[in-house]
Image: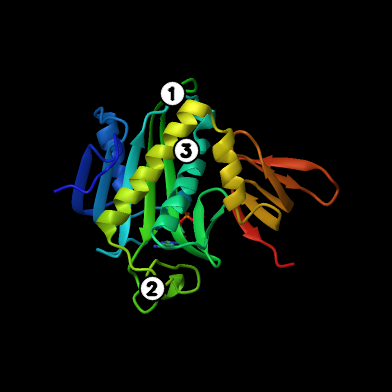
Amino acid sequence: ESVLTTKSFGRHYKYLESVESTNRIGREMANEGAPEGTVIVAEEQVAGRGRLDRGWYSPYGKGLWFSLILRPKFPPIEAPKCTLMAAVALIKAFRRLGLQTAGIKWPNDILVNGRKLVGILTEMNGSMEEISYIVMGIGINTSSTLEEIPDFLKDIATSFAMEGVTVDRREALNTILEELEMQYNKVLAEGFNSTLAEWKELSITLGKDVEVRAPGNTYEGKAIDLDQDGNLMIERADGSVERVVAGDVSIRPA
Ligand code: ADP
């Protein structure tokens, strides 16, 4: 029987034991016309990916590795809103599941005490004018322990279990899809402003001195705000402000 309490998210659902990546299946299904709200979940990803072709470690049964297909009617330039809205929804879901301390690192990571609990990878297809689909890959470490994870992740990753919270993956996925659906519908109905405000509340990046490595450029300064499209605004020492569309943020020690 199903525990699903959403209206549309997860109603079309594909469960797989092992995949290269759920986003890859998601893109194939979206290309074949899968509707908005379609969810692809796998027990393991053997070639899970982060941004810039970095790997996402997704061992069997130890996390929620899934992708969600969205078909928003806004132009591609606004696509980053989907990543931001997802981060807000995930944190709300995590609070309901008993984890209170997660924050958002711009643009797409959810951290607990500086360690990464979630990665979000948003991929888009469409024209300059119109999004055909977005496939949003979400990887959440649930039951991995410090002993189990590979050495290169021991200092940078965390999981629900490592934070002392036990989750039932089915129930957790339902809670997460509920929050994602609510947040997405709110963005569609009311626009992005209230989600943006919530994002700012939950951000661990804003207000910090940061270094942002972007393709071809590095920006240093204070992360002062997020603009309407989700770009990070960096104020340099000389007072000039730069808008950064994408990049890797490191927070500089005070
Ligand atoms: P970021 O957005 O921080 O640049 P990515 O989205 O590119 O991160 O994710 C890939 C990076 O995340 C990897 O290079 C690795 O450092 C880290 N990573 C990989 N798998 C996991 C995992 N299961 N949990 C936490 N961090 C991970």
What residue does disc 1 label?
Answer: 73
Query: From the viewer's perspective, is residue 94 above or below residue 37?
Result: below
- Residue at 68 percent across and 56 percent down: it is 211
- Residue at 38 percent across and 73 percent down: it is 150
Disc 2 beta carbon < 8 A from ligand 1?
no
- Residue at 57 percent across and 37 percent down: it is 194
Look at discs 2 and 1 and give the one toward the viewer.
1
Does residue 53 appear in the picture of this structure?
no
Query: From the viewer's perspective, is residue 78 above or below residue 164?
Result: above
| Ligand 1 sits in quadrant | bottom left
The amino acid on which the numbered mark 2 sits, given as a three-letter code, is Pro
* x then y, percent, for residue 221: 75, 53
The amino acid on which the numbered mark 1 sits, given as a three-letter code, is Lys
Task: Name the secondary structure under disc 3.
Answer: helix
Q: Is residue 222 left or right of residue 167?
A: right
What residue does disc 3 label?
Answer: 82
Closer to us: 211 or 160 = 160
* x then y, percent, for residue 109: 50, 54
Q: Name the N-terminal-most of marks 1 and 3.
A: 1
Closer to us: 224 or 20 = 224
Separation of marks 2 and 1 at Cα, in angstroms:
41 Å
Does residue 24 appear in the picture of this structure?
yes
Task: Name the secondary structure under disc 2.
Answer: loop
What residue does disc 2 label?
Answer: 150
